[in-house]
Amino acid sequence: MSKAKKNNLLYIMNPKCGWCTKANPVVDELTKDGYKITTLDITNPEDAKKANEAKAKHNAQCGTPLFLDVKTGNMVCGFREKDILAKWANGEEIPAPPPRPQQKPQQRMRKLAKLEYIWVDGDDEKSIRSKIRYVPLEFGDEENPLPFDAIMTQIPQWTFDGSSTSQSETSTSDLILKPVRFFGNPLSNRQQNSVSYIVLCEVFNGDDTPHESNSRAKLRETVDKLDESNDFWFGLEQEYVFMNASNGLVDGWPENGEPEPQGNYYCGNGANNISNDQRQTVDTHAQFCIQSGINLGGTNAEVMKSQWEYQIGPASAISAADQLWVSRYILNRLAEVRGMYVSYDPKPVDGDWNGSGCHINVSTKKTREEGGKENIVQLCELLEESHSKHIEIYGKGNELRLTGKHETASIDEFSWSDCDRGVSVRIPLTTVNNDYKGHIEDRRPSANVDPYEAFSVMIETLSVSELELVV
Ligand code: ADP
Ligand code: MN
Ligand code: MN
Ligand code: MN
C-alpha cells in the first residue's frame, strides 16, 4: 500500500499536553517516512471543531494525543512508540496497551483526635480540671508524615467557665485555655484511625494576659531570667492517700476506729498491710505515666496505711512541674475506676499518723558537677534566710503536718542536716558520700503544693547563691 495515498489520518493534540510533546517528533518522522498525517491543535478553534466532528463520528472517548483514521475509525488513544503508530498509519488495528499499574493514591492521614484539655484551677487547694474535645487533625501522608510539633500546632485554644473553678466572677466567666504541652493519652483506648492526647493548658484572661492563678506563667518568667550557670534540676516525691468514695474514709480503713498502728505499712507487703486494689492502681499509674513520657522514677507504699508515694524527675523546673500535674491527673482518673479518690491533704488523719508531703529535691550545675560541702551549705543557708517565704507557698494546711513529729521538722524553725529525716532540708546520703556532689531535699512542701509556685520561690532564693559563687 502506498503511504502517500492515505490522507485521512488525524493527529489530535494539545501543545500543552506532555504526551503530545513526545508524540510530535514521532509524527514528524512518520510524515518524513511518507505518511500524510493532519495535525489538529485543539487550542485552535477551527482545528478543535474538526477534531470534535471526527471524534463524534467515531465516538472517540479520548483526550490528547489521539491518532484517528477518520475514514475507518481506527484509533490509538494516547501516545505509543513509533513502531505502533506506524502500524496504525498503515491501517492495522492496534490493541489497547495493558493497563498501567494503579498508582497507590496518597492517603492524607486525617484522624479524629480525642483531646483531654487539663488545667490547674483557682481553688485554695489547687487541683486539676479536665474537659474533652474531639478535633480532626492532619498527620500528613504516609510518605511524609508530619512531625509531632506540626500536628500539635493544630490543637486549638479553648475556653471554659472560670466561675465554676474559682477563677472568675460569673459576669466575666469566659477564660482561655492555651495548650502548652502534650502527652500521649494512656487513659484512652486507641481505636483505629483515632488518637488521643492529654493537652496541658495555661489559663489566660480574655485580654490575653495570664490569669492570676496561672502560676506556670510566673515560673516561665522566673526561668527566663536565669543564666546558664543556674541550671536547676528538680525531683519530686509525691505522697498521697487513697480515699474510699462511698464513705469518705481512708480506703481500706475500718468504719469505726483505726487500723493497726503504723509500722509495717511502709514498703510493706501482705494483704494485712497493702490493699490489692491500691497496689494495682499504683502499678497502672506508674506504667501509664511512663507510657505518656513522664519521667516517673519509682513508687513505694508509705508509712500510713493506704498512703503511697511516687517520684518524678529530675528534670528542669517547667518540665518537672508539668509532669507532676499531669501525673496527678492520671492518678485521680485511675482511682476513679475503683471507686476511690486521692487525698493530697497534708494531714489526712489526725493523731499518730504520718502526713503527706511532696519533698522537692533540687540541684544546680555547681552542686552536681563540682560538689563540695561549702556549696551545699550555702544552699541550705539561703533556704534558711527565706524560710517563712517558702512556708507561705508550700501548701495549704501544711501547719498541721509540720509539727516536728512523723519525720517532719517544726514549721517555725528551719533546720538542715546530713541524712536526717526530722529536718527541714536533708542532705541525702548519696550526696554526702559523693563528696557532697548531688542534690539536697527540701522536706517542707506538702502533698498539695503547687510545683509551679514552689519552684519559682526556690529559684528566686537559690539563684542568688549562684551569682555569689561566681564572684
Ligand atoms: P527519699 O525517699 O530517700 O527522700 P527518693 O528515692 O524517694 O528519696 O527520691 C529521690 C528524688 O530525688 C527523686 O524525685 C529524684 O528525681 C530526685 N533526684 C535525684 N537526683 C537529683 C538531682 N541531681 N537533682 C534533683 N533531684 C534529684
Ligand atoms: Mn521518697
Ligand atoms: Mn516519702
Ligand atoms: Mn524524700
Image (spheres, grey):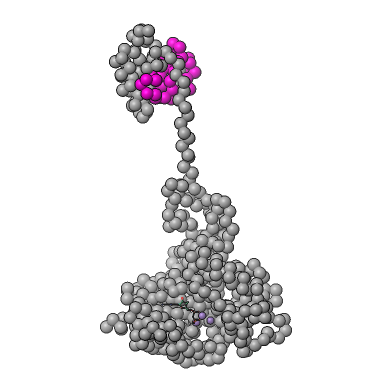
Residue at x 56% of width, y 77% of height: 300
Task: Give the residues in magenta.
Answer: 56-85
Q: How many marks?
A: 0
Q: Give x and y (percent) for residue 447.
A: 54, 79
If the image is split into quadrants, where does the C terminus sit? bottom left
Residue 70 is one of the magenta-drawn residues: yes
Quadrant of the image occupied by residue 362: bottom left
Q: Nearer the viewer, residue 447 or 216?
A: 447
Q: Position of residue 405 (x, y in %)?
A: 55, 91
Q: Quadrant of the N terminus?
A: top left
Give the percent coordinates (x, y) of residue 358.
51, 79
Q: Name the one closer to the observer, 428 or 47.
A: 428
Picture residue at 44% right of the left edge, 11% below the top: 71
**The stretch drawn in magenta includes residue 221:** no
Give the vertical position of 336 relative to 448 (above or below): above
Q: Nearer the viewer, residue 4 or 211?
A: 4
Q: Residue at x 39, y 25 (%)?
A: 79
Residue 129 rendering spot, x and y as whole percentages: 56, 68
Query: From this viewpoint, is residue 175 visible?
Result: no
- Please determine whether, in this image, residue 394 is positioned above or below residue 34: below
Q: Is residue 312 visible?
A: yes
For this orientation, the residue located farthest to the right is 256
Looking at the image, which residue is at 52% across and 88% down?
A: 408
